[in-house]
Image (cartoon, rainbow, N blue to C red):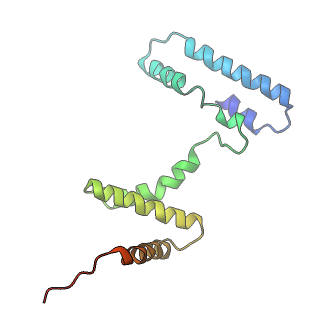
Amino acid sequence: MKDAIHLSEDKGIGTQQRDRLIVRLHIRLDEMIAGQYEDKDAKRLIKRLSRHKNELFTFLEYTGVSPYNNHAEQQMRKAVLCRKISQQNRSESGAVTQAVLMTLFRTAELQNQNPVEAVLAAAKATIEFRKPNMPEFKLAA
């Protein structure tokens, strides 16, 4: 992986040489997968590498794809901390509600909007949208 990351960061390399090095990385990975291992952790790692070998070097094939998954982890961080502080979800419906709200809050933040105001506006719009279709209820006296 270190060699693959180094290759992705090297902008001064020619296209043909880069393609040859990518092929060599795939060959090295195939050789590693084909090896015989006794350790159970090594076997588990090889099984995982074998299953995901076609996705492992995606960042070398497409520009703009990061070799790290840190961005995705950072996107989830606030929701995970909120769940931890609130002592987890108490029910399945609570988990779904939290997931939806955290998604809406994070989306608003990424669009430089106030998350609370954006979610409130979306809720109001949904209520207004449903009003004409809702039956009239009369309060019992």
Image x and y of residue 43, in percent: 46, 18
Residue 118 vs residue 75, the one in the foreground: 118
* Residue most extreme to the bottom: 141
Query: Taking 118 as reference, is 73 above or below it?
Result: above
Q: Residue at x 19, y 85 (%)?
A: 139
* Up/down of 16 relative to 63, above or below: above
Residue 55 left/right relative to 87 = right
Query: Looking at the image, which residue is at 48% across and 76% down?
Result: 117
Residue at 54% across, 49% down: 72
Residue 101: image quadrant is bottom left
User: Which of the 4 image quarters holds residue 102?
Assistant: bottom left
Nearer the observer, 89 or 2: 89
Assign the C terminus to one quadrant of the image: bottom left
Does residue 104 sit above or below 57 in this rendering? below
- Give the percent coordinates (x, y) of residue 29: 62, 20
Q: Position of residue 110 (x, y in %)?
A: 58, 63
- Quarter of the rendering occupied by the N terminus: top right
Residue 102 vs residue 65: left or right? left
77 horizontally vs 26: left or right: left
Percent of width and height locating residue 55 = 60, 31
| Residue at figure coordinates x 51%, y 62% from the top left | 106
Q: Nearer the viewer, residue 104 or 21?
A: 104
